[in-house]
Amino acid sequence: MTDDRLLTITANCTGCGACAELQPDYIGWDEEESRPLLLTDVAPDAVVYELQAFCPEDCFDYE
């Protein structure tokens, strides 16, 4: 059983869009700001780990 984690996006984001491509159920895209947008505050461990692994700027934190 996996735990849900609270997601946050840090200010380091450069807007590459990888997170929105990888996890569209959890991360949307703000076209005006060219930045990711959290669609939910919580995500399973596997989602958080994938986002952290593929983010080039290490933008995802969790509690």
Image (spheres, rainbow, N blue to C red):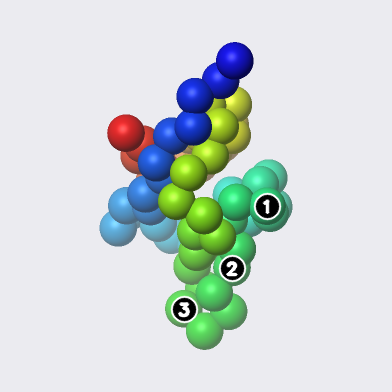
Q: Which residue is mark 1?
A: 25
Which residue lies most toward the bottom here?
A: 32
Q: Position of residue 46 (x, y in %)?
A: 59, 26
Which residue lies most toward the top here?
A: 1
Which residue lies most toward the front here?
A: 1
Are the residues flagged by discs 3 and 2 in contact, CB closer than 8 Å?
Answer: no
Q: Residue at x 60, y 51 (%)?
A: 26
**Residue 8 seen in render:** yes
Residue 29, numbered label: 2
* Vertical order, 57 against 44 (above or below): below
Amino acid type, label 2: Trp
* Vertical order, 2 against 63 (above or below): above
Nearest the eye: 3 or 8: 3
**Local crowd size for mark 3, using a 10 Å CA cut-off: few (<14), some (14–19), many (≥20):** few
Q: Position of residue 21 (x, y in %)?
A: 69, 52
Q: Residue at x 60, y 63 (%)?
A: 28
Task: Name the image quarter holding residue 1.
Answer: top right
Q: Which residue is mark 3?
A: 33
Q: Position of residue 39 (x, y in %)?
A: 55, 60
Q: Is residue 27 left or right of residue 22?
A: left
CA–CA distance in space, label 3 to label 1? 19 Å
Task: Name the image quarter holding residue 58.
Answer: top left
Amino acid type, label 1: Asp
Residue 4, numbered label: none
CA–CA distance in space, label 3 to label 2? 9 Å
Q: Residue at x 68, y 52 (%)?
A: 25
**Local crowd size for mark 2, using a 10 Å CA cut-off: few (<14), some (14–19), many (≥20):** some
Q: Residue at x 30, y 58 (%)?
A: 11
CA–CA distance in space, label 2 to label 1? 11 Å
